[in-house]
Image (cartoon, coloured by chain):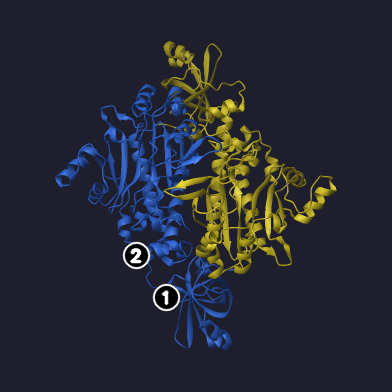
Chain colours: A yellow, B blue
Amino acid sequence: MQTYIADIAAHVGQQVTLRGWLHNRRSSGKIHFLIVRDGSGFIQAVVSKAAVGDEAFGRADHLSQETSLSVTGTVRADTRAKGGYELDVHTFEVHGDSHDYPITPKEHGVDYLMDRRHLWIRAERQAAILRVRHEVINAVRDYFNGRGFILCDTPIFTPAACEGTTTLFPVQYFDDTTAYLTQSGQLYNEANAMALGKVYCFGPTFRAEKSKTRRHLTEFWMVEPEMAYAGLDDIIELAEGLLTSVVARVLDTRKAELAVLERDTSKLEAVTGHFPRLRYDEAAKILQDKGLPFQYGTDLGGTDETVLSEQFDKPLCVTHYPSDIKAFYMKPDPERPEQALCVDVLAPEGYGEIIGGGVRLDDYDLLLERIKAHDLPQDAFEWYLDLRRYGTVPHGGFGMGIERCVAWICKLDHVRETIPYPRMLYRLYP
Amino acid sequence: MQTYIADIAAHVGQQVTLRGWLHNRRSSGKIHFLIVRDGSGFIQAVVSKAAVGDEAFGRADHLSQETSLSVTGTVRADTRAKGGYELDVHTFEVHGDSHDYPITPKEHGVDYLMDRRHLWIRAERQAAILRVRHEVINAVRDYFNGRGFILCDTPIFTPAACEGTTTLFPVQYFDDTTAYLTQSGQLYNEANAMALGKVYCFGPTFRAEKSKTRRHLTEFWMVEPEMAYAGLDDIIELAEGLLTSVVARVLDTRKAELAVLERDTSKLEAVTGHFPRLRYDEAAKILQDKGLPFQYGTDLGGTDETVLSEQFDKPLCVTHYPSDIKAFYMKPDPERPEQALCVDVLAPEGYGEIIGGGVRLDDYDLLLERIKAHDLPQDAFEWYLDLRRYGTVPHGGFGMGIERCVAWICKLDHVRETIPYPRMLYRLYP
């Protein structure tokens, strides 16, 4: 019967058997200290000659990093121990050797580690990030499920190149057909919202980005809620609620992981209540007043987003971008049609956009006009136009990139560590 | 302020505003009955001339199917009403017209409906299936999350054609590289289990199947748990726990949807406790005794699975298939090496395999031998071999196809209705 290190507190004074791997080892000569990990946590196992006998004591001195082993012993609370508990070992059994494990406690380069990602994820820091990712994803799902949203998976194979082909991955779909890997489930989400009211999709999305930046992956996960009968305020409030809920959950349940990552949690604790809002016009003025070379009418660049978000402790909502730089399906503000009813949420601490969304164009004639003006193939959009033909309603939603969100919450330099097997321009292995 | 039909019970005697679509309409001359849907449910809204006035009463008589509208009125409990409540309408407002809605209450062919899937999902039956799908997926996630499993997304783009290229979708991955869309996250899951102990992945998987059957999609969702330090009994118990938990959840929370689908729930209520188990040898004997043309040593066919599963009220676990017909990574039974430590779970009522899994080969030398015997490119498997080089442990898991599971729980003839936008051999639109 295996006990997990995560549950060790319930077994103080009892004999348990842990099954895991040797993470590290040191010795005082008379006692060997084995740091054992089992995936759920780390614990120090204390091996003394008196307890295990000469032969086993000698073997323990030669165990190498990542040897797999079962360790049986008595759990002891120890306030000095990392995690608060130690194991006094009675016996141990080796399952698999590990010679010359390639990732040692010394420093390795990122490419070296990425080539060994299947092993690198065993490291304390990487495992902590993946546990935070797990928690973020579950918090996102719980948030939407708890508010009556229905998960409605949108297809990965899509029939048409909707927004230009430069960043699309084409796939030959039997015989003569070409499919494209989805970049967003939004158009389908809109149809789903007309059927189920409040929906979300949550799956991998793909961008054939040839740029190498710290914020781009070719394959990344995105959650996209969509609501029928929603306006811009509803969308912003949903985004505020989502981020505060996700951050609170990670703070609540992943303290140990944030400590491993040396995350300054006071920055996260500030993420509550309503977020500051700036219209694009106001944002532009701030950037120009600061002397940045920002040109009114263009999209915010990475630096612009960083400068703006650094003005605030909380995520920042930037609204009403020029319609010209937003997607064809964005609804214009009736009061200023040259601006869109849209919102980008910029994460604090310079992390830039993590959420983008808005109100969708619900007028058939105007949408058709836009499709033509954008030189999009009308045929491919007939089904999408149907949503305006048959009982159109005001509606909207947003998309949140999970990797960017995790990078911010963990305060990482690069999104590549936020997913088990990142896919980038020159990275398809392992 | 919008009230959802799903929450209507809390508003009896109150005035509320519903926002939705006109599903259907009938009239007694003096009273119009509008069946309104808002995505969360259906309700009958009663329009009388006395309450709304002549002009509105006249308009209500001309509302067409799928017109979008807001309806304000008083909620009344009525045991005769479907759902138990009706709305006495005070006013209503039309948002969007709907002329000649293409899906009428009359019968349509499947191809016709599939071409209009973006509208078809508004139908009561289709929406009910999608809500069951939502519940199944959430029950699956809750099951694993509640047992200490960490969600660990495995990549969609994979570098090597691992199990033959005939059913793989290749994608040009920049310049000269070819990536393949994943068919299973399992190999990566194994690496993740060595890092995090108990893990699962849950995402879309792809099969370029040229066959048209009622059980195949080219794009389908699969959940795959993997456990370090697990044997065949652990895997079977995990599968039993998963299925009983999922079925219980749907029975508990989706009664209304199962009623819409006219599902015989007594069949689902039988899915509890431990499941019957048959070794492949025993299964073969049953089939041969029944006079089926089953050849010992071959895989079970669809008919074989149907016949076997019909012998039992519960899902059936078939174990110990011949190693030769299972994947290269399956661990042989030490007591009968020609058989694999594997399990397929066949759903009752003739639905066939919904779960497949087993113990993985954890011995380096034997795995390498198998990779060579299967003519697989050793280079591409070096990282996978690393898992046996550095602290190998007994481990295993399984995969469950969501669409097949939903088809069984809803008792559908074809998996194509279990996913919002099915992708099949000749189906990529909408």
Regarding mark 1 in the picture, which secondary structure is present there?
loop
Image quadrant where residue A83 sits: top right
Regarding mark 2 in the picture, which secondary structure is present there?
loop
Q: Which residue is mark 1?
A: B79
Q: Which quarter of the rendering shows the N terminus of chain A?
A: top left
Residue B274: x %, y % from top left: 30, 45
Q: Is residue A402 visible?
A: yes
Q: Which mark lies nearer to you, 2 or 1?
A: 2
Image quadrant where residue B120 sits: bottom left
Q: Label 1 is found on which chain of the structure?
A: B
Q: Residue at x 72, y 43 (%)?
A: A302
Q: Which residue is mark 2?
A: B262
Residue B146: x %, y % from top left: 47, 44
Callout 2–callout 1 Cβ contact below 8 Å? no
Q: Nearer the viewer, residue B211 or B78?
A: B211
Residue B333 shows which numbered tag? none
Q: Is residue B151 visible?
A: no
User: How many neighbours does mark 1 have within 10 angstroms: few (below 14), some (14-19), or many (20 or more)?
Assistant: few
Residue B96: x %, y % from top left: 57, 73
The three-letter code of the residue at mark 2 reads Glu
The three-letter code of the residue at mark 1 reads Thr
Height in image: B387 above or below B29?
Answer: above
In the rendered structure, which disc, 2 or 1, sits on the residue that comes first in sequence? 1
Distance between the alpha carbons at the discs numbered 2 and 1: 20 Å
Q: Label 2 is found on which chain of the structure?
A: B
Q: Nearer the viewer, residue A128 or A378?
A: A378
